[in-house]
Image (cartoon, rainbow, N blue to C red):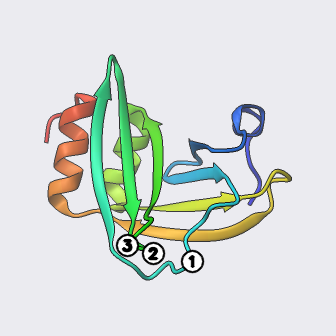
Amino acid sequence: MELPPEVRNNLSEGVCLTCCNNSVICMTSDYPKNTNVEVLFEIDKEGREVILRHIVMDDPSNPLTVEYSVDTKFVENVSQTKSINIYFVDENFNEENKLRITFSDDEIRVMRREIGLGT
């Protein structure tokens, strides 16, 4: 996957950023052991920022948390596709793993409401 310069320049170890309409890029060596697992969804507002969080239950005693900030454009795109791909990359931007997350209609409604798009 070819990453835009703004993602390459702002990505560092432990950071996840939105990219390319409906993808999330995470630079980490900690990625899911299994991608066919339950993923819990949380959303928070920190000031004017809307933060999405996925808790990947690949290891119930130590689940993986993926957290990233979203903007209106990203939420609009996700509203259309109802899914995202999370790419886990190493420090050289090589893809190590990929996780696909599909959102329910309720999750899309919550995202849209929190970002200010209504339902």
| x 47%, y 41%: residue | 68
| x 14%, y 56%: residue | 106
| Residue nearer the viewer, 30 or 72 | 30
Residue 41: percent from the left, percent from the top? 29, 56
| x 63%, y 61%: residue | 30
Residue assigned mark 3: 60
Q: Secondary structure at mark 2?
A: loop
Q: Which mark is residue 59?
A: none
Residue 89: percent from the left, percent from the top? 72, 58
Label 1 packing within 10 angstroms: few (<14), some (14-19), many (20+): few
**Residue 7 sits in which quadrant?**
top right
**Residue 28 sits in which quadrant?**
bottom right
Label 3 packing within 10 angstroms: few (<14), some (14-19), many (20+): few
Q: Secondary structure at mark 3?
A: loop
Tell me the CA gap for discs 3 and 1: 11 Å
Q: Which mark is residue 33?
A: 1
Task: Locate residue 63 relative to residue 42 in the image: left or right.
Answer: right
Q: Secondary structure at mark 1?
A: loop
Task: Locate residue 18 relative to residue 89 in the image: left or right.
Answer: left
Q: Are marks 2 and 1 in contact (CB under 8 Å)?
A: yes
Residue assigned mark 2: 58
Label 2 packing within 10 angstroms: few (<14), some (14-19), many (20+): some
| x 37%, y 72%: residue | 60
